[in-house]
Amino acid sequence: MREYFGALTIAVVLASNAVPALAQMGHGPPLPMTPAQFSQAASGQSVQIEVRIRGVNRSTLEAELLARESDSTLRLTGQSVSVFFPDGTPVVMGVPSDVASGAVLFVYGILTKPGHVDAKRVVVVTKVVTVR
């Protein structure tokens, strides 16, 4: 009986801790800016975009902006984006070596000038989305 109540207490504590975390996550994945929103963003503004990397030159990722069609399907836009990705930038759902040519990333960053973003955190979504 004592074991039952101990397990029940642990389950209640875990469940109560999970509720705020689920509330913070919201429903579904975060939404990136549309290409139009990104084009209209001002320097210094926080941005959330999805890109496919075309090439890597030291700490700079040359990429193409993607447009979201659904949670799992993205569309190429033809719009170039340069992402500054210095050593130490947090990488979620992957490791820094996953940030390579062909990878698809969700980038949280700051717009430094039109078409240029300083990455503050990237999420590697290559395996969970389709690009068309």
Image (tube, rainbow, N blue to C red):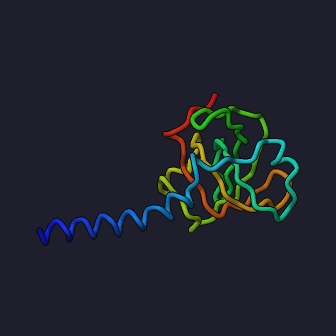
Residue furthest top as drawn = 132
Residue pictured at 47% horizontal, 61% vertical: 19
Residue furthest left as drawn = 1
Front position in the image: 80 or 76 = 76
* Quadrant into which the N terminus falls: bottom left
The number of discs equals 0
Residue 9 on image: x %, y %: 27, 70
* Quadrant into which the C terminus falls: top right
Q: Is 88 left or right of 41, judged from the image as shown?
A: left
Front position in the image: 76 or 47 = 47
The answer to which quarter of the image holds residue 18 is: bottom left
Residue pictured at 48% horizontal, 56% vertical: 95
Q: Height in image: 121 above or below 99?
A: below
The answer to which quarter of the image holds residue 77 is: top right
Residue pictured at 85% horizontal, 54% vertical: 41
Q: Is 122 left or right of 39, judged from the image as shown?
A: left
Residue 48 on image: x %, y %: 70, 53
Q: Height in image: 2 above or below 46?
A: below
Residue 100 on image: x %, y %: 56, 47
Residue 10 on image: x %, y %: 28, 68
The answer to which quarter of the image holds residue 54 is: top right
Front position in the image: 27 or 75 = 27
Residue pictured at 58% horizontal, 40% vertical: 102
Q: Is 103 left or right of 84, judged from the image as shown?
A: left
